[in-house]
Structures are given as C-alpha cells and as structure tokens.
Amino acid sequence: MSTVYENPWFKVVREDGFHWVEESGANNGAAVLAVVDARTALLVRVKRPAQGEQVMLEIPRGYGESGESSLQCACRELHEETGYRATPEQLTRLGRYRPNSAILASCVDLYLAELTSTDLVGSPDGEVLAVEAVPLGDLPALLQDGTLDDGFTLAALAHYFARAQG
C-alpha cells in the first residue's frame, strides 16, 4: 500500500490498483440527530464547497479529535454547531454509517440526542450559517421533496424512523 496524496484531513492510498480515501478523524467522528422536547429536530445550514457552494440542511457532524471517543465527539460537535450542551447520558447510538464504501474507508457513528430547551447554553460557532428547529412531523416531507439529501442525515433518519416503528 502506498500513499498517493495526503493533507491534514485525509489521504489517498493505493493498493493492487485500487484507490481509496482514509480520513484521519472519521473513525471516531460522529453525526447527531438532536431532538428537542420530543417535538423538533435541530438541523444546521452549512455551505458545502464540494457541492458547488450549495447550502445544505443537515444534522450536526464532525471529525473526532485525537483521544476522543465518538460519543465525546458527538457531544462536542452538537454544542459547537447548535449551542446545545448534551451529556453522554442524553445520547443513544443509533448505528454506524459508511458514506461511500467503494472509495472511503470511513465509518462514522450516528447518535440520537434527546434534549430539552434548557440544554441550549450558547450560540453556534462560525461553522454553520443557521440552526433550524424542524417539527418532527415535517421530516418525512423534507425527505420526500429532496430538501434533506445529505447522506449522514438520511442514514440517521432511517435509523430513527426504524426505531420508532419497531
């Protein structure tokens, strides 16, 4: 195996004619479906350069820091991107997500954060453009009309709705 390209966030490796991307912080990274007062989901608006500067509506997510568990990452990313502080006891692991198993070695844990309005303790960092509280009942329509098309969000909602039916 050889490294073809590398930067602080990822490297492209080659082995036996195959190429794939390894993201250094992805395997302890996390994505969080945050539900406030059992009524609304917190979604963030983020500009994604890889999507032609499109502003996406997504769940909070991010890379894990060195020595951090995915659960710790989930709590940190939720706070940074929404201003809500959650304790580990408020989070439930929904499952795992492999964004593109053909070219990405990443596997990220998905969490459900069950929050109350009193968990809002600050403001989001500068990474997100806005935080939106979306009624849970509106999520299926946003899925159906394509408003929600980020893979992490889709995966978390699939796990969430499967649990609700099971």
Image (tube, rainbow, N blue to C red):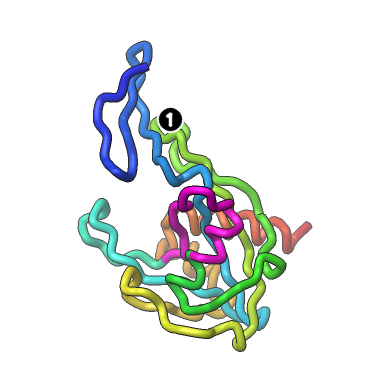
55 w.r.t. 115: above or below: above
Residue at coordinates 78% horizontally, 57% vertically from top-left? 166
Residue 4 percent coordinates (x, y): 25, 25
Residue 22 percent coordinates (x, y): 39, 35
Q: Quick check: 135 left or right of 26?
A: right
102 w.r.t. 136: above or below: above
Check the image and name the residue furthest to the left: 52
Q: Is residue 63 magenta?
A: yes
If the image is split into quadrants, where does the N terminus sit?
Answer: top left
When asked about the image quadrant of residue 113, the answer is bottom right
Residue at coordinates 66% horizontally, 55% vertically from top-left? 94
The magenta-colored residue range is: 58-76
Along the line of sight, which residue is nearer the eye, 56 or 147?
Answer: 56
Q: Quick check: 95 left or right of 125?
A: right
**Other-residue count near label 1 (Cα within 10 Å), few / some / many at <14 / 14–19 / ≥20:** few
Check the image and name the residue furthest to the front: 67
Residue at coordinates 47% horizontally, 33% vertically from top-left? 101
Q: Which residue is mark 1?
A: 102
Along the line of sight, which residue is nearer the eye, 86 or 141?
Answer: 86
Q: Secondary structure at mark 1?
A: loop
Q: How many marks?
A: 1
Q: Is residue 127 magenta?
A: no
Residue 72 percent coordinates (x, y): 58, 59
Check the image and name the residue furthest to the bottom: 118
Along the line of sight, which residue is nearer the eye, 4 or 72?
Answer: 72
Residue 104 percent coordinates (x, y): 41, 35
Residue at coordinates 43% horizontally, 64% vertically from top-left? 58
When asked about the image quadrant of residue 11, the answer is top left
* Residue 133 visible in the current orientation: yes
Could you tell me the amino acid type at mark 1?
Ala
